[in-house]
Amino acid sequence: MPPKWIDISVPLKTGMVQWPGDPAARFTRVMDIGRGDDYTALLLEMSVHTGTHMDAPAHVIRNGKTLDAMPPDAGVGPARVIAIRDRESIKLDELSHQQIRRGERILFKTRNSTRCWQSDRFFADFVSISADAARYLAERQVRLVGIDYLSVGGLKKDGRETHLALLSAGIWIIEGLNLSQVKAGPVELLCLPLKLTNADGAPARALVRQRRKTRS
Ligand SMILES: [Zn+2]
């Protein structure tokens, strides 16, 4: 039996956690057969940086690529889940032992996965990628980086620097993953963002399935 696909995206709903300052996500039934309408239809109001989503260079770089320019296979293929022990941030020390290779898709599983998604409140002290570690990933020319909370960079520290380091190196970013059900190691990733025109980001559905360890 092939391994099962594990859904690593978070549910979208009214009142869900948001990045501070982003408008609240709201999902409204504008038509409802329960109210006597002919059909039911939901209206979505949300920032593209809500829940599980991808960031494009245009998020922090003027005239940067928008998400519709992303080759779909950036988010589809072999990836590696790296478990991070540090409770504060992903630092160069911890990463430098990981033998990160060019072209890899890396998903960071931190304590965010089990801690932050249990609640609709925002955790300001979530584990993020330090600017140094982001520059290291850029040097290594990884293809994609995923993180298990709402931003690759911290709220008060390295927010812009980390985004810039990754996005200016052409690395595609997934934010808002829940990796609590996934073990560290090789996986197959399936992450497809919505094809929004000229968007700096887009909501995505992301799945992984565990692969047997192989050396390539
Ligand atoms: Zn984002």
Image (cartoon, rainbow, N blue to C red):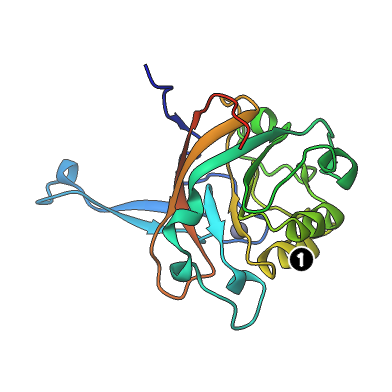
- Of all residues, the one furthest to the right in this rendering is 93
Q: Quadrant of ligand 1?
A: bottom right
- Of all residues, the one furthest to the top in this rendering is 1
Q: Confirm whether residue 139 shows in the render.
A: yes
Find residue 27 and report its horizontal and vertical position in percent.
39, 51
115 or 30, which lies in front? 115
130 or 11, which lies in front? 130
Quadrant showing the C terminus? top right
Residue 171 image-quadrant placement: bottom right
- Image position of 92 with respect to 209: above or below: below
- Image position of 102 with respect to 70: above or below: above
Q: Is residue 213 left or right of residue 133?
A: left
Q: Is residue 127 left or right of residue 4?
A: right
Residue 79 image-quadrant placement: top right
Find residue 17 and report its horizontal and vertical position in percent.
59, 45
Q: Secondary structure at mark 1?
A: helix
Find residue 191 and report its horizontal and vertical position in percent.
46, 47
- Residue at x-position 60% and y-position 26%: 213
- Residue at x-position 52% and y-position 47%: 52
- Of all residues, the one furthest to the front in this rendering is 216
Find residue 46 and report its horizontal and vertical position in percent.
47, 59
Q: Confirm whether residue 12 shows in the render.
A: no
Residue 98 image-quadrant placement: top right
Count of marks overlaid on the render: 1
Quadrant showing the N terminus? top left
- Image position of 200 with respect to 11: above or below: below
Q: Amino acid at mark 1?
A: Arg
The residue tagged 1 is: 160
